[in-house]
Amino acid sequence: MEPAAAVAATMLLLLVALFAAPTAVAGGEKIPTLVFILAGQSNMGGRGGATVGGRWDGYVPPQCAPSPRTLRLSPALQWEEAREPLHAGIDVGNVLGVGPGMPFAHAVLRSARVPKGSVVGLVPCAQGGTPIANWSRGTDLYDRMVTRARAAVAETGGRGRLAAMLWFQGETDTIRREDALAYAGRMEAMVRDVRRDLAMPNLLVIQVGIATGQGKFVDLVRKAQRAVRVPNLRYVDAKGLPIANDYTHLTTQAQVRLGAMLADAYLATLH
């Protein structure tokens, strides 16, 4: 493989990231065997502990601690040891805190249902404040997500597989009634497109039902989320989890609980 320094054009850099042989991770030998896309808006990006004073409080619960068996795909499309805030460099322009990704990975790896020695690779893709229309095929966010998912699998060197997409989004779609009513159809189309573009027609998708919203049509969006009809989709409900003082974002402990709920939904699909 040509050294990255010798590649001048951005597109050539991307091709190297997608198709080159995998490199060592964080000075070690770990390569993900189970890869998960994390997509949606701010509650997936993580605002736990980051809703007061314009900064993150820095608290990392034990369920979110770094581990050599939990990696993340960096903005440069390379595997590195994951740590909070998981979406650093991805969910740009926002104050980031704890999200559900790290507790999800820890809960999956604790389970006897996954093979011994498994390594989880998380692919952060979320961007705060985005309606689902901004995730339709051909948009910047959609293209970034698909590019990162392809790169993530390529960087495992054939040792890993894409296991699921975790999706937590919809708060912005509560602002306009027409967006709330269109939500189910847009979600179904997005799932179909992702599966086609990743050549995984049965890719597991785990959708989180919103608990809050930026507008008055929360119940309409929640109803639409429950009405999504695509195969191999699981639903996890965030309603009832603790909400921060901004009335929009999940607290740190709520994110820890949500991560465990997402892990339970994933593990329930394993036989």
Image (spheres, grey):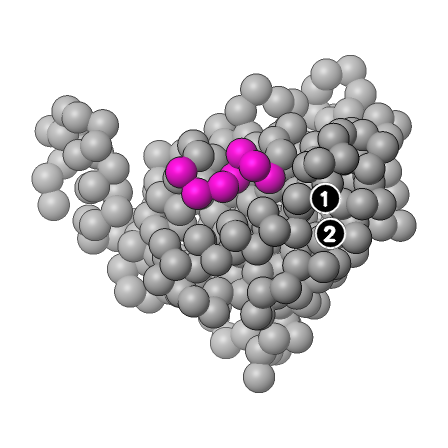
x and y percentages locating residue 219 in the rendered image: 84, 45
The image quadrant that residue 29 belongs to is bottom left
- What secondary structure is found at the residue carrying circle 2? helix
Residue at the top extreme of this rendering: 53
Answer whether residue 85 is visible to the viewer in this image. no
Total tally of numbered discs in the picture:
2
Circles 2 and 1, Cβ within 8 Å, touching? The answer is yes
Q: Quadrant of the C terminus?
A: bottom right
x and y percentages locating residue 45 in the rendered image: 62, 37
Q: Which mark's residue is nearer the viewer, 2 or 1?
A: 1
Question: What is the span of residues highlighted in magenta in the rendered image?
Answer: 132-138
Q: Is residue 169 left or right of residue 249?
A: left
Mark drawn on residue 224: 2
- Residue 91 drawn in magenta: no
Query: For the residues marked 2 and 1, what is the alpha-carbon distance in whole angstroms?
Result: 7 Å
* Residue topped by disc 1: 181
Q: Residue at x 57, y 70 (%)?
A: 231
Answer whether residue 20 is visible to the viewer in this image. yes
Residue 192 in the image: above or below residue 94: below
x and y percentages locating residue 133 in the rendered image: 56, 37
Q: Quadrant of the N terminus?
A: top left
Type of amino acid at the residue the image marks with label 1: Leu
Q: Residue at x 36, y 54 (%)?
A: 197
Mark drawn on residue 11: none
Closer to us: 224 or 55: 224
Residue 270 in the image: above or below residue 212: below
Residue 85 in the image: above or below residue 111: above
Type of amino acid at the residue the image marks with label 2: Ala
x and y percentages locating residue 96 in the rendered image: 64, 28
